[in-house]
Image (tube, coloured by chain):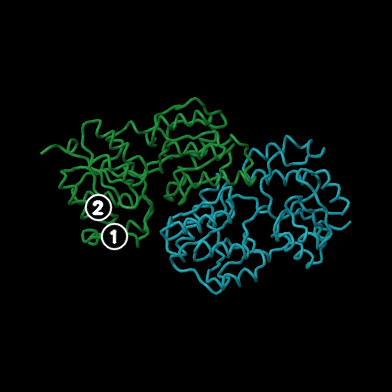
Chain colours: A cyan, B green
Amino acid sequence: MVDAGHAPLAIICGGGSFPGAVADAVAARGRRPVMFGIKGWAEPAVIGRYGHHWIALGQAGRFFRLAKAENCREVLFIGTVLRPPLTALRLDWHTIKLMPRVIRFFRGGDDRLLTGVAGVAESGGLRVVGVKDVAPELFVAEGVLGRQRPSPRDHGDIDRALKLIATLGPFDVGQAAVVADGHVIAVEAAEGTDHMLARIAELRRLGRLTASAGVGVLVKAPKPGQDRRFDLPSIGPRTIELVTAAGLAGLAVTAGSTMIAEAEATIKAADRENVFIVGVREPAPQ
Amino acid sequence: MVDAGHAPLAIICGGGSFPGAVADAVAARGRRPVMFGIKGWAEPAVIGRYGHHWIALGQAGRFFRLAKAENCREVLFIGTVLRPPLTALRLDWHTIKLMPRVIRFFRGGDDRLLTGVAGVAESGGLRVVGVKDVAPELFVAEGVLGRQRPSPRDHGDIDRALKLIATLGPFDVGQAAVVADGHVIAVEAAEGTDHMLARIAELRRLGRLTASAGVGVLVKAPKPGQDRRFDLPSIGPRTIELVTAAGLAGLAVTAGSTMIAEAEATIKAADRENVFIVGVREPAPQ
């Protein structure tokens, strides 16, 4: 029997390109990834490059059977899965036995949902690992990533947004905010970062923002106390596109806890659009 | 010379119907309102019912001259004026002399802007009064306003949103939030309440919200420490329309500090749509 760290890694895959990036990093270290694509979320082109299975949300029993058959000892969750409406779940018998616990997750905020999922995975005998454990190179490092650098004003905006996100921690809301010249102009909740950035572009078009184009920073940071094995903030080329359309100066993300998709393409896009990307240290817990 | 409380009241009017409602209440008490419509914001049909002048933002000198000629001793600010882009200001000489102070307002959040405006008005010899001083009946009272009543779950959502808004106070952001079954689904920043409610309707249409239709509460409250003479939260028939479109159960506003426009029409709309309106006590300062 191989030890957990060398046995194949079960990767439960939501949407986006991160599942593929994690699988590549895992495979590059000589470990076999086994992709479990969540129906409706995982992208066939992304998970199809490795051995894979499809599961529906709520099929914990099916997942455990398959993971066991594949000799997996550890599982990682990656990719986009928005909190599903309960009616969208396909519940199998194993999951129904877990229902009292599942219901508890759904009544809490996202953090409790995720911590709950980890508990279920562990009840099935698998250890839950985070991206940091298996592919630390997918995280943004501290410092400036491209050619543009944040100005002192940008640094002021970054500090204010980091403090705001930290303050919101107990409400289990928001991994992102936009601050322009000291004013908080957007706080992310259920809409997600892309939607929030599109709103800023719209408010600017309507003349509802007073900060000039080229002023303002998108800041992303994990919620304080968030389980770092799940749902970490992430950026990619699309983020640069939306930051540019919103007329912001750049974006700041917490070093070591924000993932970057297609790093090269992201930085190239930032340089082309003259927006900065900076990895900043997380504020100390208050 | 009449005392300040009986001299004509200068009302600086932004957009919406509140300037007219305040003028009606003032006139009903036998005091003459003098409307100063802010160009681009005040509505001719609203301010035209009383003696009025038009002023542009930044024309402090012109305003003081006219207010003095009308024998006004007190001034009240009411209606919608979004923070203007600096380029939209028409500065007169009096205002230019005040520029160092004006610039300071624009670098702060809204609260500092408003407190700054009050300082300028007072430097011109006028006392700034609030709606509460002249028309307290325009505020929502404590208790349920229409036929629908909030459920215990709604009360939980209301408490959470009130705490969130209180927590955001130091960031000078947000007089409103939406919480559904314990989840914070929207926090208002630069976009305003209407835009935030439209977003919830859109997220619901896209299947991005998990709370069922009919669950969730819009909560509006003044920011802690906000100068109550300005920019108070307000609701009206349009709010009910948007709360309904967003699929929420109702709305809660702080009693005594939230204004209600066209109270009868608002309550009628709420009863028709089966949404509740409740005036709640503000949480004690933390």
Task: Give the quadrant of residue A20.
Answer: bottom right
Please tell me whether residue A48 is drawn above or below residue B243 in the rendered image: below
In the image, is B27 to the left or to the right of A52? left
Label 1 marks a residue whose chain is: B
Spot the residue most to the bottom. Answer: A147
Q: Earlier in the sequence, mark 2 or mark 1?
A: 1
Nearest to viewer (mark 2 / mark 1): 1
Left or right, residue B237 beside residue A101: left
Give the spatial CA distance, label 2 vs label 1.
16 Å
Whether B260 is drawn above or below A72: the answer is above
Residue B124, given in percent of the width and then of the height, sits at 19, 51
Chain of residue at mark 2: B
- Name the one closer to the observer, A26 or A21: A21
Q: Position of residue B206 (x, y in %)?
A: 63, 47
Residue under numbered circle 2:
B120
Query: Quadrant of the image for the N terminus of chain A?
Result: bottom right
Q: Secondary structure at mark 1?
A: loop
Disc tally is 2
Quadrant in which residue B141 is drawn: top left
Secondary element type, mark 2: helix
B61 left or right, relative to A155: left
**Callout 1: 10 Å neighbours few (<14), some, many (20+)?**
few
In front here: B282 or B214?
Answer: B214
Q: Where A42 sits versus B23, above or below?
A: below
The amino acid at mark 2 is: Val
A198 vs B180, nearest the viewer: A198
Mark 1, residue position = B90
Kind of residue indicated by mark 1: Arg
For the residues beneath circles 2 and 1, the answer to whether they share a chain is yes
| Label 2 crowd (10 A; few <14 / some 14-19 / many >=20) | some
